[in-house]
Image (tube, rainbow, N blue to C red):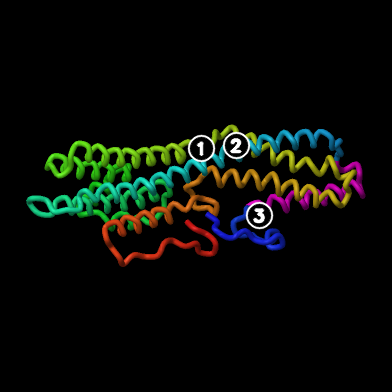
Amino acid sequence: MIVRDRPGLLRLFFILRGSIVLRILPQVLVIFVLSAGVVWARATHPGWVPAFNGAPFALLGIALSVFLGFRNNACYDRWWEARKDWGQLLYTVRDLGRQTLVLDREGQGGKEPKAARRQLLRLAMAFGHALVCHLRPGGDATKPRRFLSAGQLAGFEASRNRPDFLLRQMGQVLAELLAGGYVSDIQYTVLESTLGRMSAVLAACERIRNTPVPFGYTLLLHRTAYLFCFLLPFGFADVLHWGTPFITGLVAYTFFGLDALGDELEEPFGTRLNALPIEALADTMEINLREALGETDLPSLPQPKGHVLM
């Protein structure tokens, strides 16, 4: 995700990092060159290329703008919902760190509750990092493994849904605490409901990742946008003359840009510049939980590199 102060008006026109200019530049250049060719042909050899009335293009452009706006709103809703889910996960694990303070004591036969609290919070740290790898294939898979014992690691590697495996491990720890009489029924219910909220975040993120915007809708907009931009020079070459390449290039930048931006927002857990910084959020959760355990040798909070936070 791009993290930077809002630039001034002059710099706003020259910023490339975080924009979609580089992605759509080839298409815009093609439209520009095509428009220049059409204008040249209409001026020197009018019979070579056809000319259309530009009025229908205005109506089609309005309709296409509305459809692109609807799609971008739908994609932004996915992006924002994903951000809310990760925000919920962040405060849920903070709740877990506070709720487990009831275990920060020695049991009758040793240090069972205290060790169980540490195990729960370390599993929660592993959960955040495992969720990043689950949603963003190719992530740093070594991060969740640091918090697992040898026995847990074997099951973790064999699991098809590793975040859910970690939740089951946390549930097992709670069940053992209840069976040992270290927590009351009410305390167990509160802690179990916290795990339920973490599981709900996992399910919500999986739903977003595995249910894209309907392909037919996206395909229709892609085709219409490209067809509109390729035909546009033929409708305005006789009216705008050599201004046609610049006007059609600007229109192509707008439509192709909205289309490309919608593609990026549709995948909030991806690795493009406008994706959510879920790796940084998982690192933040780890730092918060390590602090809850009383650790003092903590790394600094994640910072953007080159105005990008991943």
Distance from disc 1 to disc 2, alpha carbons, whole Å, reads 10 Å
Circle number at residue 304: none
- Compared across the picture, whether 259 is left or right of 196 comes to right
Q: Are marks 1 and 2 in contact (CB under 8 Å)?
A: yes
Tell me which residue sits at (85%, 51%) in the image: 243
Tell me which residue sits at (62%, 58%) in the image: 6
Question: Quick one: label 1, few (<14), some, or many (20+) residues within 10 Å?
Answer: few
Q: With respect to residue 235, does 291 lie above or below?
A: below
Q: Earlier in the sequence, mark 2 or mark 3?
A: 3
Whether residue 181 appears in magenta in the rendering, the answer is no
Can you identify the residue that label 1 sits on? 212
Question: Percent from the top left, x then y, of residue 9?
Answer: 71, 60
Tell me which residue sits at (57%, 37%) in the image: 74
Question: Percent from the top left, x then y, of residue 99?
Answer: 27, 47
- Compared across the picture, whether 130 is left or right of 244 comes to left
Q: Are marks 1 and 3 in contact (CB under 8 Å)?
A: no
Q: With respect to residue 272, does 234 lie above or below?
A: above
Question: Quick one: label 2, few (<14), some, or many (20+) residues within 10 Å?
Answer: some
As helix, strand or loop, the secondary structure at mark 3 comes to: helix
